[in-house]
Image (cartoon, grey):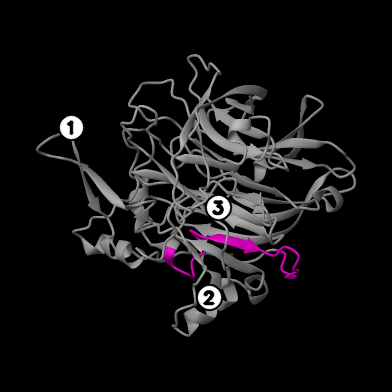
Amino acid sequence: MLNVKVSLLPMVSKINLPTVLKTAILPGDSIERLFIATQVGEIFYIGNGVIRTFLDIRQRIIKLGVSGGGYDERGLIGLAFHPEFHYNGLFYLHYSVAGTQGSSALPSEAAGRGQDGLPEFFQPNPCDPRTLNLKWINRETKFDHIDTVEEWILQSNDQPQKRRALLNLRRPFFNHNGVNSLNFSPETGKLVLTTGDGGSGYDPFNLSQDDMEIAGKIIEIDVAKNTFIGNPPVVTRFNELPAPIQETLTVIAKGVRNIPGISFQRFLNQYIKYVGNVGQDLVESIFSFVHYKPIPVTQLIQAFLMKSETEKEGFINFGWRGWEGTFPTSIIRGCSANPTLEEKTIAYYNDTVKNSFRRLQPLTSYFHKDPRPDKFGGTALTGVQAYLGNGIPDLTGSVLFTDFARDEGSQPPVSGVLAYTRVRTDGKPNDFSVIQTDYNFGSQSAYYVSLGTNLDQTKLYLGVYGSMNVTDSNQGTVFEIVP
């Protein structure tokens, strides 16, 4: 892999945490503009060098920072423009709804915060079968919040208005809701929802592998079909949805832990799909696939009712919770005989065995601890984006990814990481290379929180935040990545 160095050109600063970066051409306009969605509920666009407000739904967003002491993974986490947005004004939002704060699906989730400042999460005990087969019960009362996926329209007076809700989803925990979670497929024209496993740690209810659970899946929504249902019921499972909504949904993949969107790269007459699966404690993974066979939700439900196995040839499975990328999902403990070493125990042996041959292998992986001098220790994958431009020739045809914060045991300020890899012609996994940047953040921490591109994937945008807490306001900067 080539050593690549880029520059970061600041475009806008002192904004709230940017979750989505993508471009669109407004109706009646001819210029492609960068839109920035923030976690707290604002959508801006840059026009003539000035940042303008497109939509402000802060009053619709759940109060953030309550569960995580300032850190949160809820909020406005998805924005997608219809492929015909320039003509029809349609766009789509995914956000956590105000006034829906619950008590969490497991009482222990209110246990406090760990040494890293993040909330304490569930961890299974391989010696205690009760922790290996937990069920999410009393879902109507034992949940964290409700997410909604909505269709909006930009009216002729330039005022956005909500048209309908496509899905209302009850979520068990505050984390793993996905981010940059809405994107249109250039192959099918459908809206793709990428949603995490519901949260906590280690997917305690194994939602990601359950075919009836909406959590932990990549789902296509046919927005062209009118269900005549403007506000669907709040659900967690596909079989709880009204039939007209079921008929609009197909499932591309399962085994998702948490996912920063999906990126499509045109290659000859087909598309390479790139997705990243955020790791637990060992490894972050980027997957790629070309061919897949989505399964209609109605077919999944029929198989469930008949207690039969659905034909899954061509159905994508990333392997979670039994697999964390290339490794069996493991619990890490310090060695009592030698504190400098760690013991890694398989967390869910049966799940690991069950999915050992049914899962997609990652294109590349990077590790939370890596002694190699040209690599880095990662924290969490926050963006995956294909690049087709010629402005940075060494990156043309590659896929870039970002990590939240380099983990090297150092004190603040911390900084995120930008890296890249490529699909090999022989289809085998590939290495990756860190991309060097020349921007000096000084004494300010720089968490890399989002990665975006323009319509033809010839430009790249990076969202950076000065704090890991969304409640620390106005610490965001959006950069263009340039030669």
Q: Distance between the residues labelled 1 and 2?
A: 48 Å
The disc labelled 2 sits on which kind of residue?
A: Leu
The mark closer to the camera, 1 or 3, is 1
139, 460: nearer the viewer: 460
163, 307: nearer the viewer: 307
Q: What element carries label 3?
A: loop
Q: Evaluate whether residue 133 shows in this view.
A: no
- Vertical relation: 331 (above or below) 403: below
In the image, residue 457 lies at what x, y percent? Answer: 68, 41
Look at mark 3 in the image and give the residue it sits on. Answer: 100
- Vertical relation: 257 (above or below) 22: below
In the image, residue 384 lies at what x, y percent? Answer: 55, 43
- Give me the residue at 83% from left, 44% from top: 159
In the image, residue 395 lies at what x, y percent? Answer: 59, 34
- Vertical relation: 296 (above or below) 119: below
Looking at the rendered structure, which numbered label has been put on residue 300?
Answer: 2
356, 175: nearer the viewer: 356
Q: What stretch is highlighted in magenta?
A: 209-230
The disc labelled 3 sits on which kind of residue?
A: Thr
Q: Is mark 1 on a helix, strand or loop?
A: loop
Look at mark 1 in the image and give the residue it sits on. Answer: 340
- Residue that sits furthest to the top in the current view: 442
Quarter of the image holding residue 134?
A: bottom left
Verify CB contact (< 8 Å) between mark 1 and mark 3.
no
The mark closer to the camera, 2 or 3, is 2
Quarter of the image holding residue 255?
A: bottom left
